[in-house]
Amino acid sequence: MTRSSRPPADGTDFDGTRLTVARRLRRKTKAMLAREVGVTPTAIAQFEKDISKPTQSVLALLCLRLGLPREFFSAGRALTLLPASGAHFRSLRSTSATAREQALAYGELCLELTDLIAAYVDLPTVRLPDLDLPEELSDENIAEAAQVTRDTWGINEGPVPSVVQAMEANGVIALRLPAGTDTAVDAFSTHTGRRPLVFLSPLKADKARSRFDAAHELGHLVLHPDTEPGSKLVENQAHRFASEFLMPREEIIGDLPKRIDWPALHDLKRHWGVSLRALVFRAHTLGRMSDASYKRANQQLSIWGNPEPGPLGPAESPKILGMARQVITDSGYDFDGILAAGRIAPEVAAAVIQAASDDRPKLHFE
């Protein structure tokens, strides 16, 4: 039998979309992967589009080079590809296309696992406020959106107890990005799949910074469901949303110092669960701190660097998927069997659940 006439792997039991996801997850171009398995880039493209199927020997090499089992590539539950045009990356300009594609591929696997878990456990209903926002958002529009979100979620006056748990309780899946993700990705969010996803940096162990990151990504979900991501304007709007969501104007304005007063700012940091930098930003945007004082304060904060003085403890931790797995197991179901039936690789599921639970993720992408 000639090489060209070898039969495809297991007949037609191959899903090209899964090859696309696996390739992006491992940060490989079609040309790179083609060289590693001894085919042409055109062949890889045809595999991914399900125009043709890899031979059994080529599939074995694909599994080896991508570090995923044969079952991962089997036709099973449909994977939803997340478009880059619908994902808000905190550092879009400094994030390479390859790094963004890797993060999105991880998001696609998270959605797949979430859908499978939702077949056994009633996950919280998505409750994001449905706002009729103008195309050009004013500061008043943004402040109102933040307050409506707090009201919709039943958050009382004062600090938000946990931003991550508030999101999870209202249907938003929060996870950490895997260790080894390009540090330029930082954090991102998307609602182009069946559930909104928020991904947080695994490197920010500081509670204050991670809370603001989570609120910033929530701002994108609420304010920018159809907005092209990446502009400084869009990022600044999400920043202002986070400030209002975490520190409502009417509740904090009277306590913000007009001059640089670090002891007072430290007291506010402990009370509101936000960073000194966020408080300085809030004081300036609300007109309490002059341009000159704002500049001097930021110069001092830059000298201190991160983590800044007065740490609040470890970052808030996602929990929902880890809790859901425990519920499934406690109900007598074979979780590994469920994964196998859903064609989800156990190591992929373990990494996703670990990223959405109290334990720090340990998965490293090459």
Image (tube, rainbow, N blue to C red):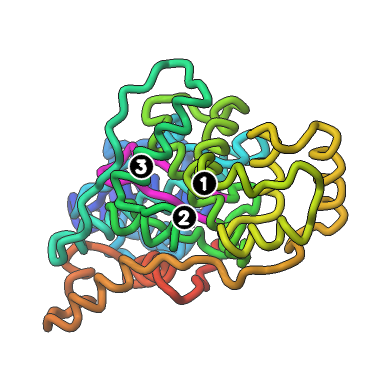
N-terminal label among 2 and 3:
3
Q: Is residue 336 positioned above or below 282 on the image?
A: below
Q: Amino acid at mark 1?
A: Glu
Highlighted magenta segment, given as a residue range: 187-200
Which residue in the rendered view is the most extreme toward the top?
135
Secondary structure type for disc 1: helix
Mark number displayed over residue 149: 3
The mark found on residue 251 in the picture is 1
Residue hosting label 2: 158
SS at badge 3: helix
Tell me the amino acid under the disc marked 3: Thr
Q: CA distance from mark 2 to mark 3?
A: 14 Å
211 lies left or right of 299: left
Question: What residue is rendered at 48% in x and 40% in y?
Answer: 40
Which residue sits at x=77%, y=61%? Answer: 263
Q: Which mark is residue 7?
A: none
Pointers 1 and 2 in contact (C-beta within 8 Å): yes
What is the three-letter code of the residue carrying label 2? Gly
Residue 335 visible in rendering: yes
Q: Give the image location of residue 350, x and y in percent.
A: 37, 72
In the depicted structure, whether residue 23 falls above or below residue 333: above
Distance in Å between CA atoms under marks 3 and 1: 16 Å
- Label 3 or label 1, whichever comes before in sequence order: 3
